[in-house]
Image (tube, coloured by chain):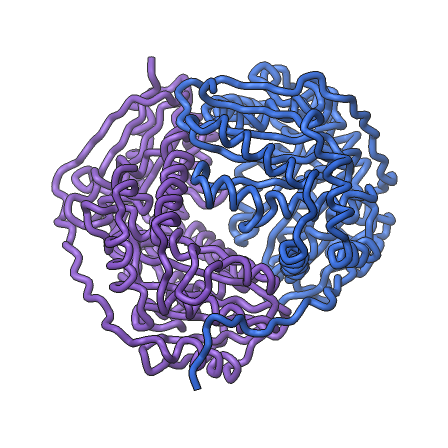
Chain colours: A purple, B blue
Amino acid sequence: MGKIDFERFELKNGLKVIVHHDPSTPLACLNIMYDVGSRDENPERTGFAHLFEHLMFGGSANIPSYDGPLQLAGGQNNAFTSTDITNYYITLPAQNLETAFWLESDRMLNLAFTEKSLEVQRNVVIEEFRQRYLNQPYGDAWLLMRPLAFKTHPYNWATIGKEEKHIADASMQDVKAFFNTHYLPKNAVMVVAGNVTTNEVRQLAEKWFGPIVKGEKPLRALPKEPEQTEARRLEVQRPVPLDAIYISFHMCGKEDADYQTWDLLSDILSHGDSSRLKQRLVKKDRIFTSVNAFVMGERDPSLFTIAGHISQDRTVDEAEKAIWQMIEELRSELVSELELEKVKNQVEASHEFSEMNLLNRAIGLAYHELLGDANGVNLETEKYQNVTREDIRRVASESLIASNSNTLVYHKQP
Amino acid sequence: MSLDRSIAPAFGKIETIDLMEPKLFHLDNGLPVFVIDSGDQEVLKVELVFPTGTAASEKKLVAAATAELLTEGTSQHTAEEIANALDFYGAYFNSHVSHDESSLELYTLNKHLKNTIATMAEVYSQPTFPEHELETFILKGQQDMLVNEQKVSYLAAKAFNATLFGKEHPYGRSAEQADYEALSRNDLTAFHQSRMLAQVAHIIVAGKLTDETISVLNEAFGQEKRVPNERASVDVNSPLERKVHVEKSDAVQNAIRIGRILFDRTHRDFVGMQILCTVLGGYFGSRLMANIREDKGYTYGIGAGLVSLKHTGYLSISTEVGSQVCKPALDEIHLEIGKLRKELIPTDELELVRNYMLGTILKSVDGPFSLASKWKTYLKHGMGTNDHYQLLHQIRTITPERLRDLANQYLQQEDLIQVTSGKPF
C-alpha cells in the first residue's frame, strides 16, 4: 500500500516542520496543528479552545484581515478544534505558498484582538452552540454523556463548552493568556504538502517562522479518570420523535496497544451493511431505525459508544437488551477469521481512499508527529493487521461490562 | 535586515487551469465509458449514470427507493450476502438520486475489481426488490422523517422547494408519511425495468486504471442491449406565494431560505450570476458573511449559491439565525442584495472574488474523483472543455457594470421568495 513520503526538520525555536512532496498536484497545503484542545481548559472556562480558534481569524499583529489576502491569492482555509488539538489549514496554488507562510506566521507571532471581534465571535459561537447542539434532535447527547462518563478528566465537557454562559463570559484577559500559553512554535507542528520542495519550505520557514520567540512548551498535568466501578445511568425527556439510547464504555487512549482492537470492535458491530448491528438490530429485528458503534479517537483514555434510535413500536428495554445480547456474543465467542479479515480489509481500503486527498495526508502527518513520529501514519494499517480474534474477545470481555457502562436514554415526550 | 510583515509577499495569478478530458471507450453494446485515468492510489470509482431521477416518476419516492433497494437482494443473493461480498473487499456502493439523474457508484481497491464489479453488475441487472426489504425501507424512512421534521433547516428547505416550483411539481414536491405507505414492489420493478435497465446513460470510471479495467467493465456491462437515453422535459411555472413561514415554536434558531427560479448551467447568464452569488454569499469573506456573521454575530454561517437542475435552476440563500434576530437578519440580507443592484462592486473586491473562484476551480479539477464529479455535471448538461475555458474567461473579464445589470435583471426584491421556519417573528 502507498506510503506517504516526507522530510522533517526543526527550527531553532522548536517549530517542527514536515514536508510532503507531491508533484502531481498544482496545489499546496499548509497545515498547522497546535497541541491544545478543550482538555486543556479551565473547568470554569470551557469552550475556550474553540472560541479561540474563531478569534484566530480576526486579524493578527501586522495583517488586519486574515481571509482577504488569502482569497486574493486563490486560497481557501479552515480550522477545527477537538478535545485534544486545534488544527488550521490552507490550500492554495503552490506558486503562492509564501502567502500562506506570511499569514500563519503572523498569527503565531501575535494576534490583534479587538473588543469588537471578541464580542462578535462570542455571539457566533453561541449561535453555533444552538445550531449544532441545542436546535437538533439528540443534539445535546454529548453534553449529557461526557459529564456522566468522566468525573475528573477534562473529557468531562464537549469542545463547544459546558454551557453558553462560559462562552458569553470570556474576557479579553482570558483570551490573551490562552494565546500566550499555547500558541508557541514549540507547541505546534507544521506540515507543508503538495507541489513544494523541502528547500523552498526550509527557506520560507526560516524567513517567516524563524524570528518567532521560542517560549516554553506548556506542561500538561491532567487529572486521571479513576476506574469506574458501577453502572451509571441518565434518562431524559426531550421533544424527540423516537426514543434513543447511548451506551458508552471507558476504553484506552489512541496510543495504547489495544486502540486498534477497540476500533475493529466498533467496525465488527457497525461498519458497512454487513455489520452485526445493521444486519441484526436494524434489518432483521427492526428494533432500531439506526444504530452505530464508534470510538472517539481521543489521546487520553476515552469512550467506546453504541448508540441508536429506537423504532417507534419498540421499547427502550427491548433495545437495551438487544445491545447487551450483541455484546455478550463478543465476550463469549471468537469472531470468525473471515469476519476479522473483512474489517481489516475495510480499514485498508478506507485508508487508501482517505489518502487520495492531499489535506488528509497533511493532517495525518501532523497528528502523528504530535504523537511523536510523523511516520506513524505509515504504520497504522499494519497495527490493524496484527489484531487477533483473541484480542477482540479479551477487550470485549474485560471492558464491555455493566460496571464500566454509562447509559443515556432519551424518552420522547408523551 | 528586518522583515516587514505588513507587506504581503508577491503572488501569482492562476494563468490557466487545464481540464483533463476523459478518454472515451465504447463497450460491445455501444455503452459509452468515460475514463479518468489518474492518481497514485490503487483505487477505482465506477459510476453508472442513469438519465432519470425523481422527476421522472409520477409517484413520489419511487426513484429513491429503487436506487436504495438495488443492493438489497438479487435473484442469486440475499441483501446480507451482497453486503458481505462487498464489505469483505473493503468496497462500498453509493447510490445518488437527484431530480434528473440517478447513479450507482462503486468504490473499490483495484486488486479486488473483478470481484466487486461482478457484484455491481448483478445488483444492477437482477435486483428482486424483496418485500421485507421494502418494508424496512418504508419503516426506517418514515421514522427518519419524524426526526428530520424536528429540524428547522429541513422544514425550511422543504417549504422552499414547494414555494418555488409548486407542491406537486416534479422539482417542488417532497415526500410525506403517506407516500411511503403507497410504495409497492411493482413500482420499483417497473421503474428499474423502464428507467434503469433500458436507459443507462454512461459509465464514468476514475482512478488508477489497469490493463484489464476496460475488459472487466465490458464483461459486466457491455453485453445486454441498451437504448440511448432520453430525458423527460420539465416545465416551470411562476410561484404563487412570496412569503411562507413554517412554525416551530420551540426553536432557538430560525432557518431562512431566500431565492428565486433562474436557469440551468447552460444559460448565457449562469456564470455571471455565479460570480454575483459568490460576491454575495459564496465564500468566507462574502458580503453576507461579513455583515451577518462577522459584524452582527447573528449566525454561525450564511451562504448563497446557484443550484442547476437539468431544465432550470434557482438561487438559494440559506442560513440559521438566532430566533430573536430573525427580522433584523432578513433586513440585512435584503440590504446586501439591494447594494448589488445600486452600487458597482469595487474593483479590489471583484479582483479578490475572481482569484478566489479560480483557486476553487483549480482545486475542483485536482485528483481523479474531483475530476469525475466535474465531468458528471458537464455530461449531464451536454457541456465540455470549451465551457470550462469560457467559465475561466468570464471570471477573468466580467465587469462591475455587467454584474450590476445582472443584479437589476434578476435580483429585484419583489421577485424573491422568502421562506422561514422556527418561532413566529
- Residue B33 position within the rendered picture, expressed as x and y whole percent measured from the top left: 79, 53
Is B407 in front, or is A250? B407
Query: Image height check: is B293 above or below A243?
Result: below
Q: Can see residue B317?
A: yes
Indicate the quadrant containing the N terminus of chain B: top left, top right, bottom left or bottom right: bottom left
- Residue B231 position within the rendered picture, expressed as x and y whole percent measured from the top left: 83, 34
Query: Image height check: is B323 above or below B346?
Result: above
Q: Can see residue A394?
A: no
- Residue B300 position within the rendered picture, expressed as x and y whole percent measured from the top left: 45, 41
Quadrant housing residue A180: bottom left
As drawn, the residue found furthest toward the front would be B343
Is B211 in front, or is A333? B211
Q: Residue at x 67, y 56 (%)?
A: B347
Quadrant housing residue B262: top right
Q: Residue at x 73, y 63 (%)?
A: B212
- Residue A344 position within the rendered picture, expressed as x and y whole percent measured from the top left: 44, 57
- Left of A68 or right of it: where is B22? right
As drawn, the residue found furthest toward the bottom would be B1
Query: Image height check: is A244 above or below A224?
Result: above
- Left of A229 or right of it: where is B270? right
Query: Image height check: is B289 above or below A107?
Result: above
Q: Residue at x 58, y 30 (%)?
A: B257
How many badges with numbers are in the image? 0
Is B135 in front, or is A356? A356
- Left of B67 or right of it: where is A301? left
- Left of B400 or right of it: where is A139? left
Q: Residue at x 29, y 43 (%)?
A: A167
